[in-house]
Image: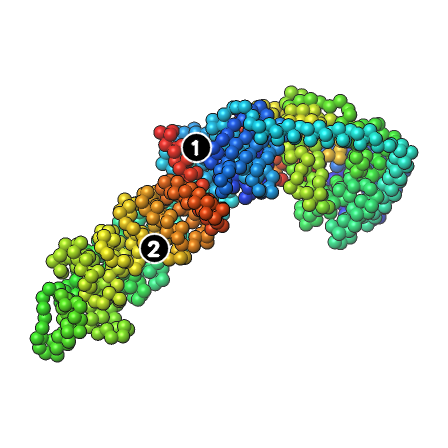
């Protein structure tokens, strides 16, 4: 019947008549009635079609029996859901932005919770494109049996899995780096072996990129591989990367070797005068010129092929700097504090004091700070802060200190446009101590801070000690009393204070359950 | 329970996403040095940038709010925050005597409402009713509609005489032109039907079937109007409504209504011709009666709504029903938000539900969908096709989007659930689901409402 109606409709009633005999017997009476109205062919067509299609709609069974439902049910959860109070506070934080969302996820996981179905539905509802890999992994831990069930049912487990071997073999370079970094956190040796197995089959750029991942969990166990790469890889950039990594290993063979070379040219305490010979006369000349560094003496060293292969340059670009001194300085800027201590026979604190007050090279261009950062030497940083030395890279240095160590220092930054460096936060936003938090908040207030992004304020809220809220309240109160209101810039600080309160309440609610 | 809403329902009250975010951010008890509630209201003081806190109150009867903050948004972030606290941290809000500033506001609101009611009644009483002019206007409109129908039927017949293979192009524009003609003829219902026809995708499979169905039903409707006097009163009312005549609201409100606790099953908002149309599907908890209520407002008044019923909420009061074949179309009388009942009761058998749809279709062939509540049904899959299955493994394919599937799986974990669907000929459209205090709904594209 339908086919006939459709064909007639397509061709048109001027070309084809509707065959009313093709209609089911049960509609015969109604069809007769339509015909008896005596309408034109189009009128009959429409009436009959309306009748037929409605008849079909009203009679069609669209449901049917199935053998099985095709999906099961989620397993029983073994972990608890958050209390109503924790849930309400978590919802507020999750809604505030990604930074807080990660905080909530981590803390809920830490306290052994999983999301209840309503929260899970809400969070999965978010556009999956907004989720990054680390968020998806956290959500997987929070989703419990239910999320597992959903992912299996929708065949989307892959998105929430730890990066794995398949990705290592077939993924993009970014994905492979993520796999390697992730593996380095839990199994540095295994990760290195994974890299070694396929290292040579990568392009030079990829070799360099993958090698940089060894920075995570770098240790002397990586030395052999890195040395081989440094000595034999055909890519200059790859060799350079390997060298950089070896130079950041304090006890590596390379550092020891450089120490030996430097010891031949740089001396502390021993006077070298009346040197004879061409080089000896140069040494005397240098010593006389550097009257301020009288405790330091120098012997020229040869710019050997070895030094050349290690990337040291022979000629200084600094006006007035002797090339030999330049060579010595380059090597000196690679040396750890332990070497300086050994060279000078002083303890570490004294060695630091010496370097900052009577450096072997003019302090204007002697960059020993690069060694501090290279070796991530927090002890060196602590000692520097104890001295009267004002580090040029104070922000990076503070990033190397632990939370407890930061409580002993003063920040002393007075720049107008200054932002809290990302390295101060750490990967997991460990809360700062009271003293350091106050230092930071005062520094922020003195700087122009209205350009901070929402995410930056939220990051600060995660780490600042709650005691800053009271300080801020007093600050706002004073501003209101003096100026009749809180300034536009400080509206952001009020927002910060509010965020800190939210985090504190959430953390308190979590602990209350315990 | 202080406030009979869920967080999602509070989100729905907010004027924009920024207000939701700000409101949630303020929903920490430490920001509220004063919090209290009574039967009529919730109130609080919220610390702001100034020395004095903002005073915020919510009228629980009408879900209206007041705040001393300078925001022009309604409800403001403080009112939203107060609601979030009342729902999520109720223990922090204590029952106490209404403060003067709240009592004054509530009294003023009541007085204003009474004054407006009295004014409307006075205006109605004073309005002279010119019955002769009314009858004349009625007849004029009837004639205009008939003239419009003549043109429409001529056009419809031309199409089928020439054949669908030679449909005039671009079809949507041609149809829109005829729709405008129907608006001129004061037959907005016919115009609406034409817009639906114009929206049919002629490149999709089975477009001919879909187009034929719509064209033939449109023809039937127009023909029915031509012979309206021969129909029974209920069908007369139905056909007039479908054509675009509206029954007087006063007439409907003056009929005896049905008093019940009305659960809002679903709300849908669409825009067309500079109008926003919001349709609510409701079900009486005690009577099981289904109702639909629609309101229209101009696009420039997008943010305001006379009613703004919240999906998943329950309102106690009277609905007044229009005369219609299926008896769903209704007007709201006096209703007030109340604590929710358990989820609405529905069909446990898909076959029975489908039978109900088919019966409705047999009674009223012009419907495109039929509201159904199903309980104890399961999300199921046959190959790539998703559907609902009941305890007898009867399977009904559904129309869905991924968000709907994921949400149902999250809330229900694959176990039996309750859903509100709009039953159609082939696939049923899942619109909403309930689980304890959670109500979730999805934006869907309806063929027709």
**Nearest the camera: B128 or A138?**
B128
Tell me: residue B436, above or below residue A266. Answer: above
| Tally of marks | 2
Residue B278 point in image, percent of width and height? 68, 37
| Residue at numbered disc 2 | A413
Residue drawn where x is 29% and y is 47% of the image: A406
Residue beneath disc 1: A86
Residue extending farthest top: B286
Which of pointers 1 and 2 lies earlier in the amino acid sequence?
1
Residue in the image at 58% along x and 23% along y? B39
Q: Between residues A273 and A220, which one lies in front from this camera angle?
A: A273
Mark 2 neighbour density, 10 Å: few (under 14) some (14–19) many (20 or more):
some
Q: Position of residue A206 (x, y in %)?
A: 36, 59
Q: Quadrant of the C terminus of chain B?
A: top right
Q: Which residue corresponds to the image point at 50% horizontal and 41% vertical from the top-left? A: B50
> Residue at (48%, 30%) from the top-left corner?
B89
Q: Quadrant of residue B266?
A: top right
Q: Chain of mark 1?
A: A
């Amino acid at each position: 019947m339908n086919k006939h109606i459709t064909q007639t409709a397509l061709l048109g009633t001027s070309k084809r008549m509707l065959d009313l005999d093709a209609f089911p017997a049960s509609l015969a009476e109604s069809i007769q009635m339509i015909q008896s109205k005596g309408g034109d062919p189009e009128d009959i067509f429409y009436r009959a079609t309306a009748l037929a299609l409605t008849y079909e709609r009203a009679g069609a069974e669209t449901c049917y029996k199935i053998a099985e439902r095709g999906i099961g049910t989620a397993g029983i959860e073994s972990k608890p859901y958050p209390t109503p109070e924790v849930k309400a506070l978590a919802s507020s934080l999750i809604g505030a932005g990604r930074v807080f969302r990660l905080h909530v996820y981590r803390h809920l996981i830490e306290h052994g919770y999983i999301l209840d179905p309503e929260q899970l539905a809400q969070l999965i509802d978010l556009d999956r494109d907004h989720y990054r890999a680390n968020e998806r992994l956290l959500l997987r831990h929070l989703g419990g049996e239910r999320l597992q069930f959903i992912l299996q049912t929708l065949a989307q487990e892959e998105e929430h899995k730890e990066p794995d071997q398949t990705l290592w073999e077939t993924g993009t370079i970014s994905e492979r780096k993520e796999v390697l970094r992730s593996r380095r956190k839990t199994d540095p040796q295994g990760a290195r072996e994974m890299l070694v197995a396929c290292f040579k089959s990568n392009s030079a750029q990829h070799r360099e990129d993958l090698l940089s991942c060894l920075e995570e969990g770098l240790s002397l166990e990586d030395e052999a591989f890195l040395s081989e790469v440094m000595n034999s890889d055909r890519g200059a950039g790859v060799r350079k990367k390997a060298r950089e990594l070896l130079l950041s290993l304090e006890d590596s063979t390379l550092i020891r070797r450089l120490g030996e070379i430097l010891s031949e040219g740089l001396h502390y305490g021993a006077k070298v005068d009346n040197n004879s010979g061409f080089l000896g006369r140069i040494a005397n000349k240098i010593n006389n010129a550097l009257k301020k560094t009288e405790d330091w003496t120098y012997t020229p060293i040869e710019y050997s092929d070895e030094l050349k292969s290690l990337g040291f340059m022979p000629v200084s670009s600094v006006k007035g700097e002797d090339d030999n001194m330049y060579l010595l300085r380059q090597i000196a800027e690679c040396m750890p504090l332990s070497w300086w201590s050994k060279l000078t026979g002083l303890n570490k604190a004294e060695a630091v004091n010496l370097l900052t007050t009577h450096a072997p090279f003019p302090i204007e261009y002697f960059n020993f700070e690069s060694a501090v950062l290279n070796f991530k030497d927090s002890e060196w940083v602590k000692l520097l802060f104890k001295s009267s030395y004002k580090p040029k890279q104070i922000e990076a240095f503070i990033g190397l200190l632990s939370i407890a160590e930061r409580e002993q220092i003063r920040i002393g930054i007075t720049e107008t446009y200054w932002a809290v460096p990302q390295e101060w936060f750490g990967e997991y936003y460990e809360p700062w101590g009271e003293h350091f938090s106050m230092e930071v908040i005062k520094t922020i207030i003195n700087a122009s801070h209205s350009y901070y992004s929402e995410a930056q304020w939220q990051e600060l809220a995660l780490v600042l000690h709650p005691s800053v809220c009271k300080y801020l309240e007093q600050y706002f109160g004073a501003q209101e009393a003096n100026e009749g209101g809180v300034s536009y810039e400080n509206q952001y600080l009020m927002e910060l204070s509010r965020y800190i309160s939210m985090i504190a309440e959430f953390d308190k609610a979590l602990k209350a359950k315990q | 329970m202080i406030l009979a809403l869920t967080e999602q329902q509070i989100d729905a009250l907010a004027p924009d996403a920024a207000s939701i975010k700000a409101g949630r951010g303020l929903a920490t008890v430490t920001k509220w040095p004063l919090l209290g509630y009574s039967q009529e209201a919730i109130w609080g003081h919220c610390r702001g940038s100034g020395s004095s806190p903002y005073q915020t109150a919510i009228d629980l009867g009408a879900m209206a709010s007041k705040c001393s903050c300078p925001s022009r948004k309604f409800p403001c972030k403080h009112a939203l925050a107060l609601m979030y606290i009342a729902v999520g941290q109720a223990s922090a809000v204590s029952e106490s005597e209404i403060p003067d500033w709240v009592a004054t506001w509530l009294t003023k609101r009541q007085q204003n409402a009474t004054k407006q009611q009295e004014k409307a009644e006075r205006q109605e009483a004073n309005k002279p009713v010119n019955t002769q002019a009314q009858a004349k206007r009625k007849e004029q409109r009837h004639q205009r509609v008939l003239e419009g129908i003549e043109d429409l039927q001529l056009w419809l017949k031309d199409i089928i005489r020439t054949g669908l293979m030679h449909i005039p192009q671009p079809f949507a524009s041609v149809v829109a032109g005829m729709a405008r003609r129907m608006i001129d003829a004061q037959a907005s219902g016919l115009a609406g039907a034409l817009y639906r026809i114009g929206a049919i995708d002629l490149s999709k499979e089975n477009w001919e079937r879909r187009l034929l169905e719509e064209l033939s039903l449109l023809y039937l409707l127009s023909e029915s109007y031509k012979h309206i006097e021969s129909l029974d009163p209920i069908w007369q009312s139905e056909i007039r409504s479908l054509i675009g005549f509206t029954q007087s609201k006063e007439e409907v409100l003056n009929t005896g209504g049905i008093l019940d606790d009305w659960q809002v099953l679903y709300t849908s908002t669409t825009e067309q011709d500079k109008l926003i149309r919001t349709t609510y599907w409701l079900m009486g908890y005690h009577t099981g009666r289904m109702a639909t209520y629609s309101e229209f407002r101009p696009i420039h008044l997008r943010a305001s709504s006379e009613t703004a019923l919240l999906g998943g909420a329950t309102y106690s009061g009277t609905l007044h029903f229009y005369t219609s074949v299926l008896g769903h179309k209704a007007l709201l009388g006096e209703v007030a938000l109340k604590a929710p009942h358990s989820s609405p009761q529905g069909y446990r058998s898909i076959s029975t539900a489908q039978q109900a749809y088919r019966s409705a279709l047999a009674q009223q062939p012009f419907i495109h969908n039929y509201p159904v509540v199903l309980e104890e049904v399961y999300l199921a899959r046959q190959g790539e096709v998703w559907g609902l299955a009941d305890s007898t493994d009867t399977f009904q394919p559904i129309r869905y989007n991924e968000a709907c599937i994921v949400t149902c799986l999250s809330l229900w974990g694959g176990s039996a659930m309750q859903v509100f669907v709009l039953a159609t000929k082939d696939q049923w459209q899942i619109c909403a689901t309930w689980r304890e205090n959670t109500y979730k709904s999805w934006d869907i594209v309806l063929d027709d409402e």
